[in-house]
């Protein structure tokens, strides 16, 4: 194994030889030069050139042919360093479209006593009441961003609890973090309140605050007699302010929860012009086939995006004392994708009462999603669910794909096939930002001791 070359200066230029890129992550014009392998890992052998922090060349490697030259015809630049990646994989940086930074890394001081959804709600409410100062929020949210950045993310969206007096505090901290991280991560914020909150004057004021901060409107939606009224109000507020929407939808195993369907109908009713994203949608996987088909048709017509959070939903859903869970908690991922609906995967909660684990690692999310939801054999284009698909949902179409002219924001893994890639954590990955290898050292949990162990 050849280590990452210390002389690989992105300003001068360097090459990466004998790498592999999954077809769905590669510029389609380049991928078309290699025969598809729909029943295999579908990895394309390539060489890359990076100059001035930008990908300037992608060449296909073909067995039995001379090794392709790295450099443009007539290029008189002196030979630059090259790294032999020995068939390891290259991915674009991750795009994590659904997180909860404000709750993150609070587990030690506010664990969920029974691991249930209701237990998580109560624990977070207590934690916010007693601990969420601006200093505490900044320290924990910044810690989460450092983890995400070190693992290879370049864009992240976080939901922010906004009920009552929390709104000014969490948005001020979020905006400060967005400024502090502007040269490393693209951050988006979403308001998180019950759907009926927007029927109140406080809800209108929150919509104005979100608009002023350049955020998105969001809400938690379950089955409710007045759900259509809530949605009409939220869509009107968003449309008046030019905001996109991101909902928590049907996060339960109750087959009667059909908020996803109601959101799709509301979009059609209002002809809402912005992007609407719906997270979780767990109940879809326990509904009768005819109901599922009806919902999928409406969601496709409304062009909603769906985000699945397999790690957190596996942890929370169908949890009962002294009983093994009978279902995995995730939504109908395969059916959604087959219906032509944009589907993304994301981290969700990390080390808080809703999920006691996690590290904002896109590869971990992909690895566990493949195992939980059988997203292999074939892998198809599921690699896009943590890259180009969430980037498009976030209005960042320039991210998530490896192509000539794109900034060299890449994650290099030693794992060759998917079995190697997904069997180990790939802790030796190389993360390139603008072509330069960053320090991937993760922050030490002990840094949070003054906040999570306030009494010493």
Image: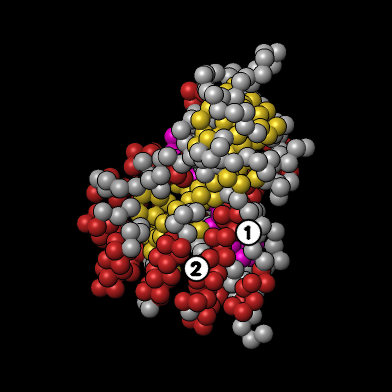
Above or below residue 318? Residue 165 is below
In the picture as drawn, the residue positioned furthest to the bottom comes out as 455
Pointer 1 residue: 358
> Which quadrant of the structure image shows residue 423?
top right
Pointer 2 residue: 102
Above or below residue 395? Residue 110 is below
The C terminus lies in quadrant: bottom right
Residue 251: give x, y in percent of width and height. Answer: 49, 58
Residue name at image x 51 percent, y 49 percent = 154
Bounds of the magenta segment: 339-358
CA distance for labels 1 and 2? 15 Å
Residue 294: give x, y in percent of width and height. Answer: 40, 41
Return the residue nearer the eye: 111 or 332.
111
Mark 2 residue crowding within 10 angstroms, few (<14) / some (14–19) / many (20+): many
**Mark 2 or mark 1, which is nearer the start of the sequence?**
2
Mark number displayed over residue 81: none
Q: Main secondary structure of the magenta part?
A: loop
Residue name at image x 52 percent, y 44 percent = 434
> Which quadrant of the structure image shows residue 9?
top right
Helix, strand or loop status at disc 1: loop
Tell me if I can see residue 130 in this picture.
Answer: yes
Instruction: Reply yes or no: does residue 343 show up in magenta.
Output: yes
Q: Are the two marked residues, 1 and 2, in contact with CB atoms closer than 8 angstroms?
A: no
Residue name at image x 55 percent, y 75 percent = 123
Residue name at image x 35 percent, y 57 percent = 216
Instruction: Reply yes or no: does residue 179 show up in magenta.
Output: no
Helix, strand or loop status at disc 2: loop
């Amino acid at each position: 194994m050849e280590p990452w070359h210390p002389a690989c200066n992105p300003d001068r230029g360097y090459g990466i030889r004998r790498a592999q890129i999954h077809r769905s992550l590669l510029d389609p014009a380049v991928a078309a030069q290699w025969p598809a392998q729909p029943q295999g890992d579908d990895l394309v052998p390539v060489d890359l050139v990076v100059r001035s922090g930008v990908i300037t060349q992608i060449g296909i490697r073909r067995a039995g042919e001379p090794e392709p030259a790295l450099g443009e015809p007539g290029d008189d630049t002196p030979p630059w360093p090259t790294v032999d990646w020995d068939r390891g994989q290259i991915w674009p940086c991750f795009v994590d479209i659904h997180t909860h930074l404000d709750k993150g890394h609070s587990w030690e001081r506010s664990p969920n006593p029974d691991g249930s959804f209701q237990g998580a709600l109560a624990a977070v409410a207590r934690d916010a009441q007693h601990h969420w100062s601006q200093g505490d929020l900044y320290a924990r949210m910044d810690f989460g961003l450092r983890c995400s950045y070190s693992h290879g993310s370049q864009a992240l969206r976080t939901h922010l609890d906004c009920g009552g007096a929390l709104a000014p505090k969490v948005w001020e901290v979020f905006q400060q973090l967005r400024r502090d991280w502007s040269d490393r991560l693209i951050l988006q914020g979403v308001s998180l309140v019950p759907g009926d909150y927007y029927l109140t004057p406080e809800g209108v004021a929150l919509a104005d605050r979100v608009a002023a901060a350049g955020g998105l409107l969001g809400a938690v939606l379950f089955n409710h007699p007045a759900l259509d009224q809530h949605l009409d109000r939220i869509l009107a507020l968003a449309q008046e302010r030019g905001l996109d929407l991101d909902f928590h939808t049907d996060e339960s195993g109750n087959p009667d929860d059909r908020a996803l369907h109601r959101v799709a109908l509301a979009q059609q009713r209002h002809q809402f012009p912005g992007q609407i994203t719906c997270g979780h949608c767990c109940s879809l996987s326990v509904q009768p086939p005819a109901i599922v088909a009806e919902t999928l048709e409406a969601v496709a017509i409304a062009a909603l995006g769906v985000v699945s959070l397999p790690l957190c939903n596996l942890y929370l859903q169908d949890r009962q004392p002294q009983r093994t869970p009978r279902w995995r908690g995730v939504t109908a991922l395969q059916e959604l994708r087959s219906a032509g609906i944009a589907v993304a995967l994301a981290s969700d909660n990390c080390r808080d009462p809703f999920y006691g684990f996690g590290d904002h690692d896109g590869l971990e999310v992909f690895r566990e999603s493949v195992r939980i939801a059988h997203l292999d054999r074939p892998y198809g284009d599921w690699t896009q669910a943590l890259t180009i698909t969430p980037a498009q949902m976030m209005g960042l179409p320039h991210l998530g794909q490896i192509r000539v002219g794109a900034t060299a924001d890449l994650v290099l893994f030693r794992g060759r096939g998917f079995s190697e890639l997904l069997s180990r954590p790939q802790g030796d990955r190389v993360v390139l930002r603008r072509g330069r290898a960053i320090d991937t050292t993760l922050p030490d949990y002990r840094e949070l001791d003054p906040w999570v162990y306030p009494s010493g």
